[in-house]
Every structure is written in structure tokens, then in C-alpha cells.
Amino acid sequence: MADIEVLLSEEQIAARIKTLASEILAVYGDEPITVICVLKGATIFASDLLRALGPEHAIEFLGVSSYKGTKSTGHVRITHDLAASLEGKHCLVVEDIVDTGLTLAYIVKSLSVRGPASLRVASLLDKPSRRQVPVHVDFTGFTIEDRFVIGYGLDLDQRFRGLPYIGIYGGE
Ligand code: IMP
Ligand code: MG
């Protein structure tokens, strides 16, 4: 059995997503949003957020993979591209966590040239102490310390994504 300490409970996450959705809707007004879910970590958060936003919004999926070497510059590439054009759409990139910022910086750079009417970012978690490149996060669920977290979509070698809460992995 893995030793996991609960950092954010199911209830805390659900309550924050409700308020986050209100904060997001206050900015977009009646404009339909294209939610861009970053695979795979953001899938659970994006599904709950989409339902909290209401029925008029679209969802798209973007797969990226990042390789972090010893150098400060990570290499990021798109493994699954969006099915729809972003031309003239109000886009909200939905991430699980912003750590060094390298993945998000690459995503924003790649999507901003596709002609969206607007491009904003929502991340469930943010670890600002780990930042290597500046990135702007418009909507943050929770700001956390520099701890490796799992659950609610976040994995450790593909494990634990199905945990309903966010925890800190302490070994087996
Ligand atoms: P960044 O490019 O360093 O900002 O990394 C972002 C990605 O690294 C996230 O989308 C996650 O997939 C992964 N990641 C960063 N920190 C954690 C963590 O604490 N737990 C699980 N995955 C993480
Ligand atoms: Mg991710």
C-alpha cells in the first residue's frame, strides 16, 4: 500500500472549482469558452470545471510531452493536437499544475499564433517556487509548496491519477 498524505481533500477541490468557475465566468461574461484540456494530468480537473462552467462551452484536448534534462531549458513537443481551429475563439488552457513553467510557456506560444480571440490559462495547482520561465496564470486553484503531488489526474509514472483527492506521495 502506498503511503499518501492528503493535501487537498475531495471536498476542498470541489468547493474551489465552484468558486473558480464563478471567477472565470465573471471574466468571460456570456462568451462561449473553448476549454483546452492539457492531457493527461488535467483531464479530471477539466471535466469538473467544464460542468461547473455550464453547458455552453466546448472542450478540446492537447497532448504535450516534456523532457526535463539537467539544463534549464526543457524540451516540449505536441503529441496530440487539437481537433478544432482556434480562430476567433475565446480559449482557456486548463492545466493540472504549473511547475517550472516550461510546458505552459510552450503551449501558450504554440496556441497564440492560431488566431484565438483571447487566450487565458487556468491551473488547478501552482508551485511558484519552482518557476524557471515567467508564465502568466489567469486563474489558479491552489498555490502549493514545492512538494511532489499525486491524484485527481496527477500521476507518478502513470499511477494515482484516479485518486479523488490530491496527496503527497511518501513511498510504498
Ligand atoms: P513544468 O513544465 O515544469 O511547469 O511541468 C508541468 C508538468 O509537470 C505538469 O503538467 C505535470 O504533468 C508535471 N508535474 C509537475 N509537478 C508535478 C507534481 O508535483 N506531480 C505530478 N506531476 C507534476
Ligand atoms: Mg501536465
Image (cartoon, helix red, strand yellow):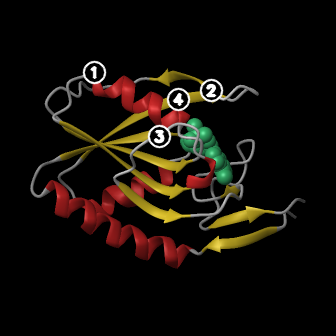
Q: Residue at x 51, y 50 (%)?
A: 96
Residue at mark 2: 74
Residue at mark 1: 113
Mark earlier in primary sequence (4, 3): 4
Q: CA distance from mark 4 to mark 3?
A: 19 Å
Q: Amino acid at mark 2?
A: Gly
- Residue 47 seen by the camera: yes
Tag 1 and tag 4, C-beta contact below 8 Å: no
Mark earlier in primary sequence (3, 1): 1
Residue 51 placement, left or right of 152: left
Mark in front: 1 vs 4: 1
Q: How many marks?
A: 4
Q: Is mark 1 within 8 Å of ligand 1?
A: no
**Identity of the residue furthest to the left in this view:** 30
Q: Is mark 4 within 8 Å of ligand 2?
A: yes
Q: Disc 3 on helix, strand or loop?
A: loop
Mark in front: 2 vs 4: 2
Residue at mark 4: 64
Q: Amino acid at mark 1?
A: Val
Q: CA distance from mark 1 to mark 2?
A: 21 Å
In the rendered structure, find residue 134 and report the number of the disc placed on it: 3
Tag 1 and tag 2, C-beta contact below 8 Å: no
Q: Residue at x 59, y 66 (%)?
A: 164
Mark in front: 2 vs 3: 3
Image quarter of the C terminus: bottom right
Q: Disc 2 on helix, strand or loop?
A: loop
Mark earlier in primary sequence (2, 3): 2
Q: Crowding near pointer 4: few (<14 within 10 Å), some, many (20+)?
A: some
Tag 2 and tag 4, C-beta contact below 8 Å: no
Q: Is mark 2 within 8 Å of ligand 1?
A: yes
Q: Disc 1 on helix, strand or loop?
A: loop
Q: Quarter of the picture for ligand 1?
A: top right
